Structure formats: C-alpha cells, structure tokens
Amino acid sequence: MQNNTSIINKIIDWAKKEDEIKALILIGSLAGKGSIDELSDFDISVFATNLEKYAKDDSWFHNFEKVWVCEPCEFSRINKTYQTRLVIFKDGLQVDFALFDLDVLKDLTGRDELPVDYSLGYKVLLDKDGLTKNLKPPTFKCPEIPKPSKEEFELAIRIFFFEAFKQAKALVRNDLWHAKIRDWITKKYLLKMIEWNEKAKHGWDYNVGCAGKRMQSLVAEDTWEKLHKTFAHFDAQDSWKALTATIDIFSQIAKQTAKLLGYEYLEDVDQNITMFIKNLKKN
C-alpha cells in the first residue's frame, strides 16, 4: 500500500498549493468499515471555487503519477451537473476525482442525513477554511431497503417474466447480444427479489450490502450454489440453460418471499410465460 499512501500525499500537497481548492474528502471503501484489498480504489471529492480550471484542462492529475487511462464522466448533484475524472495510474492504482463547487459542500453540511456515498464513510483529507466542521458523522450503513408494497412486489414479478419472455425470443432468433441485454435485466430483478427475501427472513434492518457485493456471505449456501447456473457463455444452448435456471430460482425465491410478506404470488404470470418459453425452446 506504499504507492497508495504516496499518491494521496501528492494529491494533498498539490491541493494545498491550489488557491481555488478548499477541501478534499475521501469516500468509498477506503473511508468506510467494509473489507478492502490491494485492488481498492480511492474516491476523492474535490471542492473548489473554480471548477472550469480543472474540468477543461486535465494536466493537473498527470503530475501525481504516470497515467494509464482516464475516463471523463459527469453526474448530477443538487440539480447541477458535475464532472468526474476516473483515473488509472501506473501499476493499476485507480483514483476517482469528483469535481464539486462549494454549493455541494454547503448542501452536505446542512443535511440531517448524508447521501449514501458519504454515509458509508468519509475522511476529510484537507479543509483549508473549516468548511467541513458541520458534516454529520457517517453511519457506515447502506440505506435501508424498505418492505415492498404489494404493487411494487407484483410489478417486480411482471417485469422479470416480461424480460425472460423477450430473452427467449432473442435466443430463438440467435440474437445473442440482445439476449444478454435482456438477461441482465432479469438478473437485476432476481437480485431485488433476493434482497427482499433475505430481509423478510432476517428483519428489514438486515444489511444485504450494495449492488450484490459480498453476496456469498449474505445468502443461504444453496441459493449461492444455484446462482452459479444462472450465467451463460455467449452461446445459445448455454444461454437457454441459464435462462431456465434463472426462472427456476426467481420463482422459488419469489414464492417464498410472497409467503413471508403475506402477498399472493402471481402464479398465472409465472405459469403462462414459463410454459411459453418451454414450448418456444422445443420448437
């Protein structure tokens, strides 16, 4: 981790000399309480009075270390669009820079609840004017996933089976790329159902992680084993097997979750689409 420490010190030293930069805050895994490893990257929020200086000219981060590649991105915060620079330096060290004006910092310090990326953990690396002193402490917890309403639960089932239907049609046409796109949507709703299931079993304050991270430690062993069959090669025959496995595990978990929540499972949706897909595969 020596290179990591070195580059952070370089960034802090550089920011100290830049009059426009008022604060640096580290967020992400290296500022939280979750597990980290040698591949963990740095997420640094840069708060400045003149964003254009750093958004229009990327020479500044080339001073820290040799750059392998940079991906410029943008995202929205407090109804404004801000720039980011996702940089991979020599030896694969990644630093993601988010460029903010002081309005964002003012918004953060005025909040009763921090946004999730700060709530999961942050460390102030530099604060020239004491602007971060009123930041609420992080909770180090992912946002709670509330119990779904009956309507939300049923919608998830409908979307899953609709996308499974579209994936099957793509496979019949040997349209493998489009099938993969549909497959990923079914996986998103499978993940949602797994999260609801685990919370329904353990309580709605049960931590299911974020975006499927560390899933193996959160779900039952048999569930984890079944998930191995739900991903396929770029191959029609293998994709059919994975689609069948995905439908089977979704159906099983959704039925169990419906029972735990006291909802009716949409058996007709399941049966109609599943039978159509089976017949489509035969033909």
Image (spheres, rainbow, N blue to C red):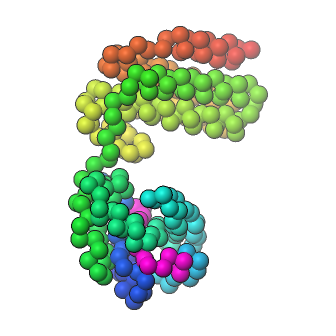
Q: Position of residue 176 (x, y in %)?
A: 71, 35
Q: Position of residue 71 (x, y in %)?
A: 58, 66
Residue 10 visible to an observer of this rendering: no
Residue 58, image quadrant:
bottom right
Find out whether residue 87 is within the magenta segment: no
Q: Is residue 25 above or below residue 210?
A: below
Left or right of 179? Residue 105 is: left
Residue at far right of view: 173
Residue 269, image quadrant:
top right
Residue 194 visible to an observer of this rendering: yes
At 42% from the left and 42% from the top, the residue drawn is 212
Q: Position of residue 228 (x, y in %)?
A: 48, 33
At 42% from the left and 86% from the top, the residue drawn is 18
At 36% from the left and 86% from the top, the residue drawn is 16
Q: Nearer the viewer, residue 84 or 166?
A: 84
Residues rendered magenta in the picture: 39-54
